[in-house]
Image: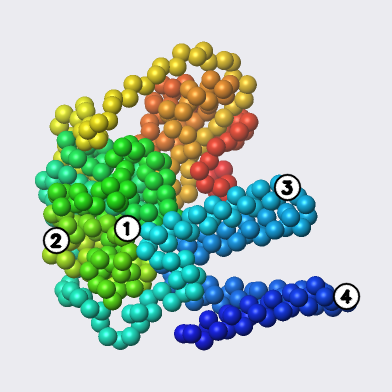
Amino acid sequence: MICGWGRHVLNLLLLIGCGVVGVLFGLSTDLGYVYLLVNMGIGCIIGWHMVMAIGGADMPVVVSMLNSYSGWATAASGFLLDNVLLIITGALVGASGAILSYIMCKAMNRSFFNVILGGFGASSSSGAPAANQPEGEPQPVTIKEFMPLLTSAKSVVIVPGYGMAVSRCQHDVGTLVDVLRKAGKTVRFCIHPVAGRLPGHMNVLLAEADVPYTIVQEMDEINNDFKSTDLVLVLGANDIVNPDALENPASPIAGMPVCEVWNSGKVVVFKRGAGAGYAGIENPLFIKPNTRMYYGSADKTICEILEQTRAKYANCDTTQATNTLPEEEEVVEEVDDTPIPDPILTLGVPKEVEEGERRIAMVPSTIKKFRRLGFRIVIQAGAGLSSDFSDEEYAKEGAEIVQSAMEIWNGSNVVLKVRKLGYNEEL
């Protein structure tokens, strides 16, 4: 791949060549397929050369834009084929991808053309150290040292990142938040617009873990509150909490809006190791005096913290959770007295057998909803234990508990699973 301005010149020449071959294709009567194949080859080279020059931190924008391009191509095909459905669906895909790319570029304080033309990190490619780069070593923390920080903090903010998605620890995080709130602590989430891989990624994970939406706030809503926050937990996030974005003009991410977690009393960063983030640049947050590094896989560390937190507050009055937003009104759940009809079909839920899988395809709160639709619900014994749902909870809602997975597969019209079906020696 050609570097510097040379690659831009090459891309321009390839683009001009693509246009010339396109004109020749339109004028040709006997070599049309040859010109078409040549144009396809040039297009492949352009696509490969442009994408390879783009830095890793910008790749979500590229993926979104490629998705947008596919939509516009579909819409163009619709005009050629006089197909209204292709035009409408292509326009929807193209517009949504373009809007998503704009949101991400704005959140990173980058222009669209700056991303597409590549060159991320070029300003720091020289061997000279970046200006205003603090010196020091990260200070690791153990569970024994972390627990006093957590139990003594009155206000806690959690900043999730892609690491939480990779470790799939959102359910344990949601349970931990529930325990802390019932113990009287103020707990909120700070969501950066590009946390994870796409806007809304973290919101979806937290909603999956039943985290109340009232304590999930955007970065702009909570940034000014970090100064009055006792403890910030950074779960698998890196570039979105990098102070160089605001403090170091020479940084490749200078000007990018970030979560200003370093203004809080204490910051604990959960990471697998001390490596750089997705943008490939160092994060001086890790060596600030008020920052501690909790190394390890988040699914194991959060589970360990959850166990000790439960033990700490086992004897506390946890009948009421605090720190929903002050103006939040109490939600009264409506009781559905709709009679449950005789079942027409059987819906089965077997135990997930894949290593590390803790989810289950159906939770107890949804049992009655399916029963009112005419389903008989059959759950394999122990299927919900990894998600903290007992067989008694399922039975209380009207589900039937069976011992073996074969009873599920042989006696169900529909089987619900989290993971795709694969070979299992137990069956």
Give the residue number, with chain letter if any, for mark 2.
290
Q: Residue furthest right?
A: 30
The x and y percentages for residue 151 are 14, 45
The mark lying in front, picked from 1 and 2, is 2
Give the residue number, with chain letter if any, for mark 1.
236
User: Which amino acid is tagged 2?
Assistant: Asn
Which mark sits nearer the N-terminus, 3 or 2?
Answer: 3
> Crowding near pointer 3: few (<14 within 10 Å), some, many (20+)?
few
* Residue plotted at (74% across, 78% down): 21
Is residue 100 something that shows in the picture?
yes
Label 4 secondary element: loop
* Residue plotted at (53% across, 22% down): 371
Label pair 3/2, CB-CB below 8 angstroms:
no
Give the residue number, with chain letter if any, for mark 4.
29
Q: CA distance from mark 1 to mark 4?
A: 58 Å
Label pair 1/3, CB-CB below 8 angstroms:
no
Q: CA distance from mark 1 to mark 3?
A: 44 Å
Label pair 4/2, CB-CB below 8 angstroms:
no
Q: Vertical placement of 338 versus 176: above or below?
A: above
Label 3 secondary element: helix
User: Which amino acid is tagged 4?
Assistant: Thr
Which mark sits nearer the N-terminus, 1 or 2?
Answer: 1
> Crowding near pointer 1: few (<14 within 10 Å), some, many (20+)?
many
User: Which amino acid is tagged 3?
Assistant: Val
The tag on residue 84 is 3
- For the C terminus, the quadrant is top right
The x and y percentages for residue 305 are 23, 48
The mark lying in front, picked from 3 and 2, is 3
User: Which amino acid is tagged 1?
Assistant: Gly
